[in-house]
Amino acid sequence: MKDLLVVVRDGDLLNKTLATISYNRLGAKTNQQVTVCDGWIEGIELAKKSGAGTILFVDSGTVFTDWAQWLQELQKYPHYGLIGHIVWKTDRDFYPWLHEQCWLIDQDLLAALDFSSKNLSYPCPVRSEKNIHDDYTPLYLKPDLDSKCQHESVHFTQVMIAAQLARGRSVINWHQKIRSIKHYLHARNPLQNQIWEASRKEYLDLAENQFWILNNEAIQFYHGRHQLSPAAGLHWILNICQPSIQEMDIIDISNRQIEFARHLWTNWDGKDYGQQVVDFIRTNQLIHYEIDRANLDKITRLKLKNPSNLKRYVNERFDQLAPADFVQLWQLARQTKTARFQVGNLIDWVIQNGISTIDAVWLSNIVDYKWTLLNSSKQDIVKFKEILQNHG
């Protein structure tokens, strides 16, 4: 959906929510425009200033199993200006309201909202005969233009409902298909949590066994005696050959990546990196692996499924990055330097161990990574950044 802004209210589960909006099902970036707010009124004001035509408000703890599919369904939705989880328990609630987990509103309606007074006056809502589930979730609310309701709002979303009905337009509920893509982790709903956990596990299994042959970012060379680094690609390989570096801790969430790195350090003589890659893929029967960028076109990917083509491609890239005397430097490093390999979360490692003895830390993209958002709290990431900043 074009011109869509997502406003997320901060909370304990913020990172889990952001992980499912900013990244797709398998971890690629969505480039979705997202703003985080401390409260809904602040979020509404930010949305008004943004100029976005349509705004999706999402509470922390709301997660999406497939953001691309969510947007596709949203495009087809019968949108009349306001969509949300309509709640109207007639035995308890005199007037309907929207559950805060997720609601969509257009800019025209948003601009007309006035929260300065709780006194509402608008055409009375008429509920649909059918419900989404149970007896308090009507499919829609439509205005009865021949009657008027006047009352104080007891929930801020009633201001939106009143403004929408005053425009002579209906308020629409989320239908079952789109609900199947979105889950609210605060809800006491075991089925929703099971579906979310299955979706989460699918991605985690992929990430924790991912194999990066090269890097999709420029290699940075560091000085100092002791370096901390993920295991992806060539970064640690080329850096441990730097004269000043004598010790390296290699921490990575991918079992497969650590296995390959440890194998190189133990067995490889520094010659023909491409052959090492091809042999590792064949031995472990790997189907999914990344080379030097995740967006390789399909034709190139297909060609690189051929071991000879892959070996040649990898060695060409390696030779462009490695120094001419790499073999000698690598062999010397293996004989005289210390490398430790560990499967784990580098953020947790830094928080638990500190970096007082570390001279350089290479982060790669771990702070801007779906796995990190799913496994590290906002507080942990803030603490991690503070440790790095204080270290200088």
Image: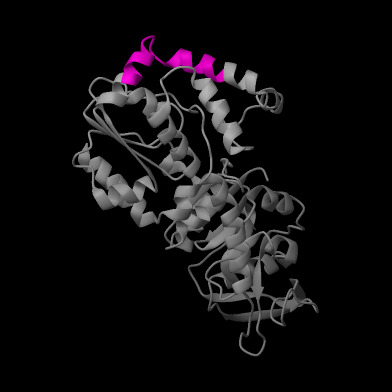
State the residue lying farthest toward the right. Answer: 129
- Quarter of the image where one finds residue 275: top right
- The dominant secondary structure in magenta is helix
Q: Closer to the camera, 386 or 160?
A: 386
Residue ID at (60%, 74%):
189
State the residue lying farthest toward the left. Answer: 356
State the residue lying farthest toward the bottom. Answer: 91
Res. 56 in view: no
Q: Going by the image, does 252 lie left or right of 89? A: left
Residue ID at (61%, 57%):
199
Q: Position of residue 264 (x, y in %)?
A: 42, 29
Residue ID at (67%, 47%):
68
Quick check: is 326 in the magenta stretch? Answer: yes
Numbered range of the magenta stretch: 313-331
Q: Closer to the camera, 260 or 298?
A: 260
Quick check: is 295 in the magenta stretch? Answer: no
Position above or below: 302 against 383 = above
Q: Closer to the camera, 125 or 259?
A: 259
Q: Looking at the figure, which quarter contains the C terminus?
A: top left
Res. 342 in view: yes
Residue ID at (73%, 57%):
79
Position above or below: 145 against 317 = below
Q: Position of residue 108 (x, y in %)?
A: 63, 54
Q: Position of residue 210 (x, y in %)?
A: 53, 40
Q: Position of residue 276 (x, y in %)?
A: 51, 25
> What colouring does the structure picture have?
one colour
